[in-house]
């Protein structure tokens, strides 16, 4: 007899992933906003961080974080080739099936 | 052996390897169907898929155009790292829905998705045709940029023993040969080797540049001394341009036909998501590196600001080659790495162009060998037609990239919106695409490339998406009233 805790429905395992992915994407969007120095005055003296002008170092740091979060987001993304097709493409298939049924019925 | 002779020898060895790969890939074929030729039988695993995505994304534009642009613009071109990363972010909106449909319904080209999503009525057919035309133009432009870059590199690596014209024609013929023989398999396998060569070459070049200049801090201070505006914080228009470029390239690059076809060509969805997970880091070790190379060249070189600045990388490599035997060998390796990156993008463009013309524009469907043959012939015809344009050397590579993206971005609503929003109609999508394209092309032709730093293509996309949204809502309301 199988232990119910061992055979968890796939949805249970997917739920944390589904919650994490939008959070990661929101954090990436915020980093993109912060990477551009729109909040900086353009007449400030040159200051170096890691050999780069400070505003460039901030941009590089933001993009480094984007790379990490995006990579985690992709590892969390499950692309199932045989899952039911979602969205309008799935609807178009249902329309086609309905049309085919209709044609068979008519003939 | 001097630099030119070593370069000629390395080029000969490289070309021989390409011919061999083309032949091996040809013998590995499972058939002559379009999906076997154009998608490698949908068998690309994580390793090859990742490297082919990498080598295709980073091209002659990245290796010659981006250092040239960084040399002209200075540190603000760090935006390039952001837009190359944005591509992998935007794929989140497309891949999870497109991939299962592509596998289950056997898509080969982007037009197969359009046909499936928007139907085969008159508006749907016109939309597929319009998207196909824009994509074919963008691909042809991309191919043109690669041919120009190939000619430049071949001429430089051999010290003009192979002149620019011979380089363009000869290497184009080489790509046509192995792509025709081996299809996507040959392209992906050569891409894998080319990707490794490119990454290693670029890292080595940056290390040499920084060590020779006394480190990054010295480079920055020298740049600030000779060209203060290159280290200055961008003004409001500069920041607007930064955002606009990320939107333009991040969105439009996702719609590259060759990128979409790699989504179809993956062995499994898992292989695809893992490849993207690794791809997320590549802008840091490629785009950022070429940007820094262009910036490090500012105090070293005095190049004219136009197309001549695209020669930053080759000029630096020539300098490196003059530092002794080790420098000569290293410079030749980077040159061949650059050439292979360029050719890997050109071959992908050519393969996609053939499939796009055969299926999306000429309306071929199914899996006949005749269709794959037609694609090969059409690709050859286009290549021959583009070569004379490539012999014109005055247009900068960066401007070619922008022109291509301003066209391609108008296809975004059909893919990124259409795959999520069920009410989006074919007629409204077509109307938006035509209006957005007319707006962007009209302003570009009248000499207006940007408004307040924002690309006209991005503004055109705003117009395009508004028409799609309003048109689809209105059409839905009209249908509801008619039904009632």
Image (cartoon, grey):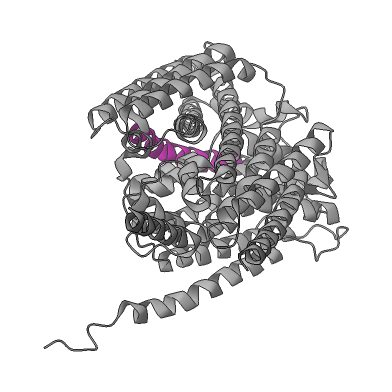
Q: How many marks?
A: 0
The reply, left or right, for residue B372 in relation to residue B401 is left
Residue at the outermost left position: A1
The image quadrant of residue B164 is top right
What secondary structure is the stretch in magenta mostly built from?
helix
In this view of the protein, which residue sits in the foreground, B394 or B99?
B99
Residue at the outermost front position: A107
User: Image point 60% across, 71% down: which residue?
Assistant: A26
Question: Relative to B280, does residue B289 appear above or below in the rendering?
Answer: above
Start-end of magenta stretch: B184-209
Q: Is residue B298 visible?
A: no
Q: Position of residue B259 (x, y in %)?
A: 48, 44
The reply, left or right, for residue B140 in relation to residue B464 is left
In the image, residue B201 lies in the stretch drawn in magenta: yes
In this view of the protein, which residue sits in the foreground, A22 or B372?
B372
In the image, residue A39 lies in the stretch drawn in magenta: no
Question: Relative to B29, does residue B466 appear above or below in the rendering?
Answer: below
User: Image point 69% across, 47% down: which residue?
Assistant: B431
């Amino acid at each position: 007899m199988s232990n119910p805790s061992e055979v968890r429905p796939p949805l249970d395992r997917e739920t944390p992933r589904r919650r994490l992915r939008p959070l990661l994407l929101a954090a990436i969007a915020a980093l993109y906003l912060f990477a551009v120095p729109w909040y900086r005055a353009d007449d400030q003296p040159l200051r170096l961080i890691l050999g780069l002008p400070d505003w460039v170092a901030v941009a590089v740091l933001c993009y480094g974080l984007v790379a990490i979060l995006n990579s985690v987001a992709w590892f969390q993304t499950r692309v199932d080739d045989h899952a039911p097709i979602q969205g309008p493409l799935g609807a178009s298939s249902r329309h086609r099936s309905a049309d085919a049924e209709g044609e068979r019925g008519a003939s | 052996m001097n630099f030119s002779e070593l370069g000629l020898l390395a080029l000969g060895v490289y070309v021989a390897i390409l011919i061999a790969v083309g032949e091996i890939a040809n013998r590995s074929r499972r058939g002559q169907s379009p999906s076997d030729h154009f998608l490698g039988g949908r068998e690309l695993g994580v390793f090859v898929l990742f490297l082919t995505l990498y080598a295709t994304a980073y091209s002659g534009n990245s290796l010659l155009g981006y250092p040239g642009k960084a040399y002209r613009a200075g540190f603000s071109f760090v935006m390039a790292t952001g837009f190359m990363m944005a591509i992998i972010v935007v794929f989140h909106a497309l891949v999870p829905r497109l991939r299962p449909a592509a596998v289950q319904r056997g898509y080969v080209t982007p037009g197969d998705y359009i046909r499936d999503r928007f139907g085969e009525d008159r508006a749907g057919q016109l939309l597929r045709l319009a998207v196909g035309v824009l994509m074919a133009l963008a691909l042809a432009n991309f191919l043109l940029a690669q041919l120009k870059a190939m000619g430049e590199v071949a001429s430089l690596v051999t010290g003009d023993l192979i002149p620019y014209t011979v380089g363009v024609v000869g290497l184009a013929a080489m790509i046509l040969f192995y792509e025709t023989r081996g299809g996507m398999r040959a392209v992906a396998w050569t891409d894998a080797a080319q990707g490794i060569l490119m990454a290693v070459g670029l890292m080595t070049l940056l290390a040499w540049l920084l060590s020779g200049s006394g480190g990054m801090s010295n480079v920055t201070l020298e740049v600030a001394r000779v060209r203060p505006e290159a280290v200055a914080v961008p003004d409001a228009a500069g920041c607007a341009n930064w955002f606009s470029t990320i939107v333009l390239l991040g969105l439009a690059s996702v719609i590259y036909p060759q990128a979409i076809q790699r989504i179809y060509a993956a062995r499994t969805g898992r292989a695809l998501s893992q490849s993207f997970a690794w791809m997320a880091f590549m802008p840091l070790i490629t785009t950022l590196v070429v940007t820094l190379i262009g910036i490090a060249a500012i105090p070293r070189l005095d190049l004219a600001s136009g197309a001549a600045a695209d020669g930053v990388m080759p000029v630096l490599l020539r300098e490196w080659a003059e530092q002794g035997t080790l420098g000569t060998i290293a410079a030749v390796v980077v040159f061949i790495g650059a050439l292979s990156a360029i050719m890997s993008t050109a071959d992908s463009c050519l393969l996609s162009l053939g499939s796009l013309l055969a299926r999306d524009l000429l309306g071929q469907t199914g899996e006949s060998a005749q269709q794959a043959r037609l694609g090969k012939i059409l690709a050859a015809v286009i290549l021959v037609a583009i070569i004379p344009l490539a012999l014109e050397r005055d247009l900068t590579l960066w401007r070619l990239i922008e022109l291509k993206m301003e066209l391609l971005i108008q296809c975004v609503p059909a893919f990124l919106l259409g795959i999520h929003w069920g009410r989006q109609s074919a007629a409204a999508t077509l109307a938006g695409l035509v209006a957005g394209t007319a707006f962007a092309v009209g302003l570009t032709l009248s000499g207006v490339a940007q408004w307040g730093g924002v690309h006209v293509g991005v503004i055109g996309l705003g117009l395009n998406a508004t028409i799609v949204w309003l048109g689809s809502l209105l059409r839905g309301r009209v249908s509801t009233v008619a039904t009632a």
